[in-house]
Image: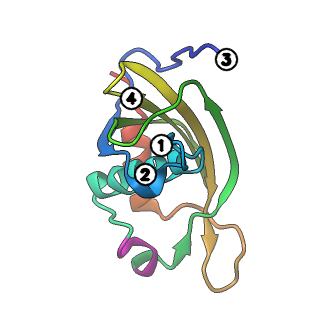
Amino acid sequence: MPQFRDNLPPGARTFEVQQTVQWADVDAAGIIYFVAYWRFQELAEMRFFEELGFPYGSVFDDFDFWFPRVRTEAEYYAPALMGDVIRARLHLEKVGASSVRWRTVLFNESTGVVAAAITMTVACMNRRTRASMPIPPPIRAALVEAAVTE
């Protein structure tokens, strides 16, 4: 198994959410199925955007865009079991003109170890033309502010 190294910049702003590993997240042995970690990452992503004032339930309609995933990378460090509590900690790594990259570290609060880390890049795409477009200015401004370290 690889060794986890935390690359959180000093003073970085983080966004966190906790969720318990459910029956639907595990295999027959009661161990989390690796894809379930992505659900935890997406929950952190949704809550992050809500905290910035752009809930996923309306932001795409309001600004007429999508944020498709264009690059993802996951590292798995330790298994989680049904009933374990996972704390997802998201921080922005880069905000570009038309893309954003963030990293979500998934801590197993029940065991005290890091279970996985996921790095994701999304690109801004016009919903009608499906062409690349700049991130809408109010969203980009909030992202840039969230990426600022103290």
Type of residue at label 3?
Pro
The question of residue 2 being in magenta is answered with no
Q: Nearer the viewer, residue 103 or 65?
A: 103
- Crowding at dot 1, Cα within 10 Å, few <14 / some 14-19 / many 20+, comes out as some
Q: Which residue is mark 3?
A: 2
Type of residue at label 4?
Asn
- Crowding at dot 3, Cα within 10 Å, few <14 / some 14-19 / many 20+, comes out as few
Residue 108 tag number: 4
Viewer-nearest of discs 4 and 2 = 4
Type of residue at label 2?
Glu
Viewer-nearest of discs 1 and 2 = 1
Residue 30 tag number: 1
Distance of label 1 from label 3 (alpha carbons): 22 Å
- Residue 44, horizontal then vertical, whole percent: 39, 48
Rendered view: 96 above or below 135: above
N-terminal-most mark, 1 or 4: 1
Residue at x 43% of width, y 51% of height = 45
N-terminal-most mark, 1 or 2: 1
Type of residue at label 1?
Gly
Residue at x 45% of width, y 61% of height = 137
Does the CB distance between marks 1 and 2 fall below 8 Å? no
Distance of label 1 from label 2 (alpha carbons): 26 Å
Q: Nearer the viewer, residue 134 or 129?
A: 129
- Residue 124, horizontal then vertical, whole percent: 61, 63
Quarter occupied by residue 126: bottom right
Q: Secondary structure at mark 2?
A: helix
Q: Secondary structure at mark 1?
A: loop
Boundaries of the magenta span = 57-61
Viewer-nearest of discs 2 and 3 = 3
Distance of label 2 from label 3 (alpha carbons): 25 Å
N-terminal-most mark, 2 or 3: 3
